[in-house]
Image (cartoon, grey):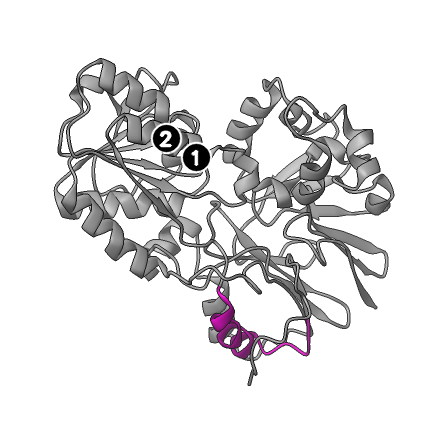
Amino acid sequence: MVEVKVLSGARSIGGNFIRIEDGDRALIFDQGLRFDIMERFYRGFIAPKGLRELREIGAAPKAEWYEGANAIYISHMHLDHLGLLSNIPSRTKVYLPSLSIYEVLEEKWRNSPTWLSLIPRKYYVEIEELRPLETDENNVMPLPVSHSAYPAYALLYFGSNETVLYTGDFRVESFLKDEEFIKVHGGISMPEYLSENKDLRVDRLIIEGTNLGSIRAPISPAEEEAMLRKIIAAHTLVIATMHPLDLEYILLLDRLALQAGRNIYVASEGAAKLMETVANFRTRPKVITDYVKILSRFEGANLIDLDENSILIASYHEVIEVLRDLRNAGALPRGSAAILSEPEPRVEESQEYEAIMNWLLKLGTQAYLMRTSGHYYPHEFKTIINIIRPKRIDIIHTKTPGLNITRCR
């Protein structure tokens, strides 16, 4: 008999830990960090001392939650879902959205002088990559979803007496067109799959509700694309920041660059490595070798190669350094703009947006703070539920799980 335990994430945005017990099988869906708790205890010079302390304050899952687990499934690699793989106390198989992308991130984390060095796996953790739309030996099928981390999945479990769908984080509309989504994600999206398979009954839906109760104005990917097109047309050099996992956003910039007849340059190793996972770029991106030290299949370039017809992709950590170097080289055109794409979860980046904005003003660069959420909006909840048609709904990954937002069916 299927028993679902939401051990963390029921009343917080992040820190999901879902344990499913079914006979002699025990599965875990996500094992994320509680950043809301970390913010209460760590600030400035106060940093975590280790795994035990993070467990004690409730920021990391308790060791006993893992007891008897056959496998751990990670929906996507934002740290409020991926968590610390070093926190896994015993030999366990972990299913990740992408082994190659994880290994790139793992190298960065392992060499970090901060608490991020706690993330990488221990030697006994076996990793396997999720295969979209394939049911595995544990009766789990990963369903591709659009999100601000690539790749991302909902997890469908076919249990002995119940079918359970855990959505992870997702948005209804993607930056990618249907054919491009399938090519990049390896299959159709979760809403489309469930729409096409109407005979599939979901007994229990565990759905994120990040934007429930939020006053943020809903902006769709199509609306953001229209705004970005106007900004690119109005300015000379455009610098765009992005989260190192937001491949859909990078592909949107690639599409807009082609339409505007612009060249794309990359000044971020993380972005360059992520871009190498796909081969369907419409433009021919070049990497700025002053910032991308790794070997790349993309052609190399220098800062002085940038002109008024360029779009430069950088990370939040590098954007001010790049702009200062451009100014010092006399290569920062008048009328330049910086598009800051606010990351999710923002706390992961620990960025001082006010300081970044002050630097942009000093450098004579117009700033735009843009964000299309990686999560569906409240007005879309009815559409989602009418597609899935679950018998029971648990709303997690939100501070307002009991909010009565709409009438369904």
Q: Is residue 41 left or right of residue 186?
A: right
**Residue 112: percent from left, percent from top:** 59, 20
Q: Is residue 299 left or right of residue 359?
A: left
Q: Amino acid at mark 1?
A: Glu
Asked which quadrant contains residue 164, the reply is bottom right
Q: Would you call the spot at circle 1 few (<14 residues within 10 Å), some (14-19), or many (20 or more)?
A: few
* Residue pointed to by mark 1: 354
**Residue 399: percent from left, percent from top:** 66, 59
**Residue 102: percent from left, percent from top:** 55, 34
Give the number of the disc on residue 370.
none
State which quarter of the image contains the N terminus: bottom right
Q: Main secondary structure of the magenta part?
A: helix
| Range of magenta residues | 377-393
At 43% from the left and 30% from the top, the residue drawn is 355
Alpha carbon separation for disc pair 1 and 2: 6 Å
Q: Is residue 386 magenta?
A: yes
* Residue pointed to by mark 2: 358
**Residue 35: percent from left, percent from top:** 66, 41
Q: Is residue 148 visible?
A: yes
At 24% from the left and 14% from the top, the residue drawn is 328
At 48% from the left and 71% from the top, the residue drawn is 380
Whether the residues at callouts 1 and 2 have beta carbons within 8 Å, the answer is yes
